[in-house]
Amino acid sequence: MNEEQRAEIEKLTYEQARDQLVGVVQKLEAGGLELNAAVQQWELGEALAQHAQKLLDEVAQKLNEVQESQAQFQANAGTQAAE
């Protein structure tokens, strides 16, 4: 996989990466690919899976930050109401 292909994958949304990954898995499961083509599909699938996971991790991090911020706000609101 070359840098241009990796750059294109980095531009994909989660949904686009997931859909392309499904297509790769279907091709590999169907069989009939020559070894080189199968390896290329495998590499593509790995890159798509890594990109999709990275996007999921970023969303999880944002959710954690929001939850922490909300918890701090609620803790501070409770403290201010008691004063």
Image (cartoon, helix red, strand yellow):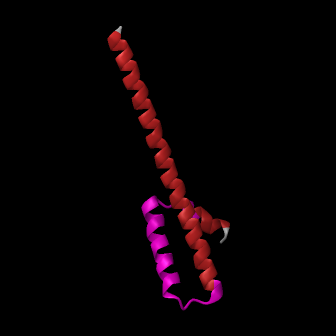
Q: Nearer the viewer, residue 4 or 34?
A: 34
Q: Say whether residue 11 is visible.
A: no
Q: Main secondary structure of the magenta part?
A: helix
- The picture places residue 57, in percent across and down from the top left corner, at 51, 51
Q: Residue at x 51, y 77 (%)?
A: 24
Residue 41, by quadrant, is bottom right
Asked if the magenta segment contains residue 34, the reply would be yes
Q: Is residue 55 left or right of residue 35?
A: left
In depth, the one of 48 and 60 nearer the eye is 60
User: Which quadrant would the C terminus be assigned to in this image?
Assistant: top left
- At x 43%, y 36%, the residue is 66
With respect to residue 23, does 34 lie above or below?
Answer: below
Left or right of 16? Residue 7 is right
Closer to us: 81 or 66: 81
Query: What stretch of residues is rendered in magenta?
Result: 8-36
Residue 57 seen by the camera: yes
- Residue 23, image x, y percentages: 46, 76
Q: Residue furthest left?
A: 81
